[in-house]
Amino acid sequence: MILYIFAINFHNSPHMKNVSLLFFFLLFFVSANADTGYPITPVPFTDVKVEDSFWQNRIEKNRLATIPIALNQCEITGRFEHFTQAANPNDTVRPRGILYDDSDVYKIIEGIAYSLQSFPDKKLEKTADSIISLIENAQEPDGYLYTFRTMNPHHHNNKGMGSRRWERVEHGSHELYNQGHMIEAAVAYYMATGKRTLLDVAIRSADCICRSIGTGEGQERVVPGHEEIELALCKLYLVTGDKKYLNQVQFFIDQRGRTERRSEYSQSHKPVTEQTEACGHAVRAGYLYCGIADLAALTGNRQYIQTIDTIWQDIVRHRLYLTGGIGSAGDKEAFGPHYFLPNETAYNETCAAIAWAFLNQRLFLLHGESKYIDMLERTLYNGMLSGLALDGKHFFYPNPLASRGGYGRKEWFGTACCPSNLCRFIPSLPGYVYAVHKKKLYVNLFMSNSTTLDIEGRKLSLSQKTDYPWDGHISLTINSKRPGQFDLALRIPGWVRNEVVPGGLYSYADGLKPQFQITVNGQVAEGSMSKGYFIISRTWKHNDKVDISFDMPARTVTAYQEVEANRGRTAFERGPLVYCAEESDNPTGIFNKMLPKKPLPEVGVFDTTKLQGICPILVPSQQVNYTTEGYITTKISRLHLIPYYAWANRKAGQMNVWFPQNLKGVEPSYQ
């Protein structure tokens, strides 16, 4: 029987001692039925206390800086005012912002819910409650909730939202997109606090959608122009047990390619199960693919699984940036053709990186293969993290891989989906560290933390100590009141196994063969490799210690020859981090540097004084100059590289990830 019955009974209990386990079950739709639901269960983020300097600092800054800034910007830009105006409609008001502004408010509430689970904060909870009251008052009696229409029913932006409800859903109204984020926020806030106000708003809204959209008489036969509602309705189905929400998800997915709009931009050019390549707006696509994965898990439909597996392969083989970013065509925020991966004009929206991380977690929960966590980790440390400044107060929307110096972080954006998305993603990060399947415990991400978890009814505590991503040593201590047998599955990252990404889009070019060693209580561990994991099967005792050591040299990376932008160029990595050169560290220039045929990068000394602590990479190079007479001269120089996520946190300047190894890609400077 599906987990929702447990959910209802649990929340009818007068004493909600701990909602965290159920909360994360709902996030990833685990079912007690072996035929439906994700077979692997993530350990809830509220049960994992992060204690290292790298991620703990960022989670704290999300609570103390990012969320407060986002709340303030919603006040300044009129996002809260829209709800007040919708509660008191009249013929004179005009929206100040953009049709999807409501979604930012909802994402921030979702982020607050996650933060409250780890860091109870009465003041922040009170703020959220006051915003929820605004939302409740803005909802129309039949459940419809869309401030841009409700605040002035007689003023219509026909190009944007049309003259009647749902008329422009496929063409840009964002009615369903907004409601998707509201429903996700409602489920999260309910699970965090037990308060039903926003959940009841969500139920009324979802009921309105189900009544209004479908194939029945008087219903609109439309699908979302911007996907998101699919993920949300799956969560609402599990928290309420009402199957009409799951049926509505299936309608939205199965009707794509069969309604009025047929467009690659919104992934509606053909039916979903006929799609084999990623296309269109990268964020919309990412959310759709997550919705397909969720529906596959809840229904057991193998055709959906085959579809999403095929599309994932297309992305990693043809359309993925080295940083784990997706979406190369900036004019449409979209996937480009195969191997179209320009660096300076790379779009790589922060929201797209987050959607890609969501998808890879889901595919891991379906298949149990480390390659999905490898992709998640690459995006996490590079394509996503670059979107957030070290101070937690400034943001990137696109994340290019090269800059001439005119690109910098912003305090906010007119379209502010990226800052609000970071608000909700960062505090949920601890939930990606561990997962459980029957008697198997997966260790997926490496960061200092402590957790208490359950393996088939057996409680145990686990602590992890590491200086990752700067150091490749990880120490695990297992504590259990009584001995117990289970399999410990330790992810051996692709970068250790000499695989940059699955499918060969990028390759290591240095001939190195990193090694790893795993010991249990000081003795070399006995185990075997399976699906990218080193599996140790044994009876574990109290205070057993597992030590993992990964070689972590600086590596050189080349791209597949069909990637024209990187032909004849090399990039650098160390562990999970992609590196770049920034003008602040290379005052004589970046684009005037040429690498030797065999670059020999060196790992520098960890610098606690720079960029909140980094380990640089130093690379010998040739600086190419013009003499006053116009002749080319060269001299030995050195590139100083920093982690890509850390660029643009100092003065504005040039930045580059891929460096030429011939004069074709060099721009000599005058000396």
Image: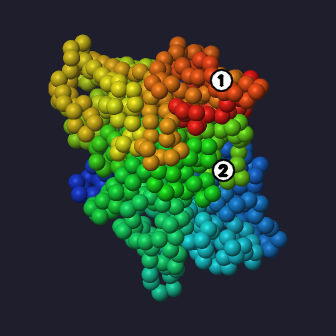
Identified at 67% across, 44% down, the residue is 70
Which quarter shows the N terminus?
Answer: bottom left
- Residue 156 bears which disc, if any? none
- Per the image, the residue denoted by label 2 is 416
Cβ–Cβ under 8 Å for marks 2 and 1 = no
Check disc 1 and report its element: helix, strand or loop.
strand
User: Is residue 214 shown to the viewer in this render?
Assistant: yes
Place residue 297 in its image quadrant: bottom left
Check disc 2 and report its element: helix, strand or loop.
loop
Identified at 56% across, 22% down, the residue is 621
Q: State how far apart marks 2 and 1 are (Cα).
A: 47 Å
- Per the image, the residue denoted by label 1 is 633
Type of amino acid at the residue the image marks with label 1: Thr
Within 10 angstroms of label 2, few (less than 14), some, or many (20 or more) residues? some
* Residue 290 sits above or below residue 464 on the image: below
Task: Find the residue positioned furthest to the bottom.
Answer: 217
Q: Please give left or right for residue 581 compared with residue 298 in the image.
A: right
Q: Position of residue 170 (x, y in %)?
A: 56, 72
Camera-nearest residue between 246 and 655: 655
Identified at 64% across, 60% down, the residue is 100
Q: Position of residue 57 (x, y in %)?
A: 56, 27
* Residue 238 sits above or below residue 669 on the image: below
Place residue 257 in its image quadrant: bottom left
* Residue 141 sits above or below residue 3 on the image: below
Camera-nearest residue between 634 and 463: 634
Camera-nearest residue between 497 and 118: 497
Identified at 30% across, 50% down, the residue is 366
User: Is residue 19 shown to the viewer in this render?
Assistant: no
Q: Earlier in the sequence, mark 2 or mark 1?
A: 2
Name the front one of labels 2 and 1. 1
Q: Position of residue 130 (x, y in %)?
A: 66, 50
